[in-house]
């Protein structure tokens, strides 16, 4: 089965292509059909404080690459790398708040066995970069969840649109088919810069993608 067909099926909210990788209780509903596969972006904005501090401790991980592609071709091999990376980090890291683990509200870092939502994102980004994915298509993204709380996910720019890697689910979905309101993300050409996302969808909560067998998220 080609990667293109898999993404079409995801956009139609079927999970046939990924059933071997999904935990029990995971489901998705169809999203708006008139939304672009790529997030609409607006003006530059402030980076999260936790990210700024992270870059002072890991400066090489916040540098722009020599090339800045907008998207990668989602071959079958690339698709499997996304699935395996998302699933492996989700299963290896247990969710815990920064306050409980570090005694402070925000501390972005690479997790060992526990971490906050940003830590999952950072680890997935590092692992994918180690497999040859360019930094410009692996963008840390801030959203509001179904309860209005802040949450972080990894946006992956592909020729099939922006896909989302999330510690709350092993299912990888197009951005518009997740139950989130998108706020801001890293800028493609300069990882230290952040840009607002013009998410004007009237009903961003288009599906249920929680892992029902996992502990409640803490971010």
Image: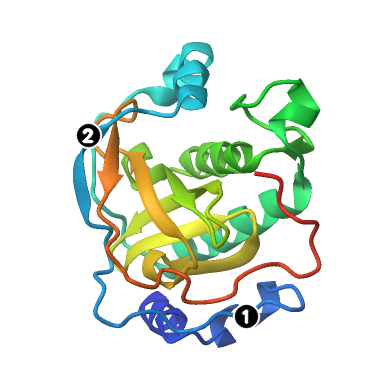
At a point 23% along the width and 50% down the height, the residue shown is 70
Q: Which residue is at 74% across, 79% downward?
A: 25
Q: Earlier in the sequence, mark 1 or mark 2?
A: 1
Mark 1 to mark 2: distance in Å? Answer: 34 Å
Contact between marks 1 and 2 (CB within 8 A): the answer is no
The quarter of the displayed image where residue 46 is located: top left
Indicate the position of residue 204 as horizontal and vertical percent values.
Answer: 41, 68
Q: Closer to us: mark 1 or mark 2?
A: 2
In this view, 163 is above or below 141: below
Q: Residue 72's mark?
A: none
Q: Nearer the viewer, residue 76 or 123?
A: 123
Q: Total marks drawn?
A: 2
**Residue 36 on image: x %, y %:** 24, 70
Q: Quadrant of the C terminus?
A: top right
Residue 200 lies, with reference to residue 143, above or below; the image says below
According to the image, what is the colour scheme of the structure? rainbow
Q: Position of residue 181 (x, y in %)?
A: 41, 58
Say left or right for 179 vs 196: right
Other-residue count near label 2 (Cα within 10 Å), few / some / many at <14 / 14–19 / ≥20? some
The residue pinned by badge 1 equals: 27
The quarter of the displayed image where residue 157 is located: bottom left
Q: Secondary structure at mark 1?
A: loop
Q: Which mark is residue 44?
A: 2
In the displayed structure, 150 sits above or below 76; it is above
Q: Nearer the viewer, residue 22 or 214?
A: 214
Write the residue at 27% across / 39% down: 195
Q: In which image quadrant can residue 24 be found? A: bottom right
Residue at horizontal 59 percent and vertical 78 percent from the top: 18
**Is 48 above or below relative to 103?**
below
């Amino acid at each position: 089965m080609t990667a293109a067909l898999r993404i079409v099926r995801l956009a139609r909210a079927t999970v046939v292509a990924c059933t071997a990788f999904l935990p029990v209780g995971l489901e998705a509903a169809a999203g708006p059909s008139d939304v672009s596969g790529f997030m609409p972006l607006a003006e530059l904005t402030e980076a999260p404080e936790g990210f700024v501090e992270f870059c002072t401790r890991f400066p090489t991980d916040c540098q722009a690459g020599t090339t800045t592609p907008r998207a990668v071709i989602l071959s079958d091999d690339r698709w499997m790398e996304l699935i395996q990376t998302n699933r492996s980090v989700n299963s290896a890291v247990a969710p815990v708040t920064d306050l409980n683990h570090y005694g402070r509200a925000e501390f972005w870092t690479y997790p060992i066995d526990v971490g906050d939502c940003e830590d999952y994102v950072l680890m997935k980004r590092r692992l994918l970069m180690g497999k040859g994915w360019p930094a410009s298509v692996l963008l840390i993204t801030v959203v509001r969840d179904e309860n209005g709380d802040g949450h972080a996910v990894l946006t992956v720019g592909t020729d099939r649109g922006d896909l989302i890697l999330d510690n709350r689910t092993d299912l990888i979905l197009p951005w518009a088919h997740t139950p989130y309101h998108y706020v801001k993300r890293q800028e493609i050409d300069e990882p230290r810069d952040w840009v607002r996302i013009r998410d004007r969808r009237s009903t961003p909560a288009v599906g249920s993608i929680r892992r029902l067998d996992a502990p409640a998220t803490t971010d």
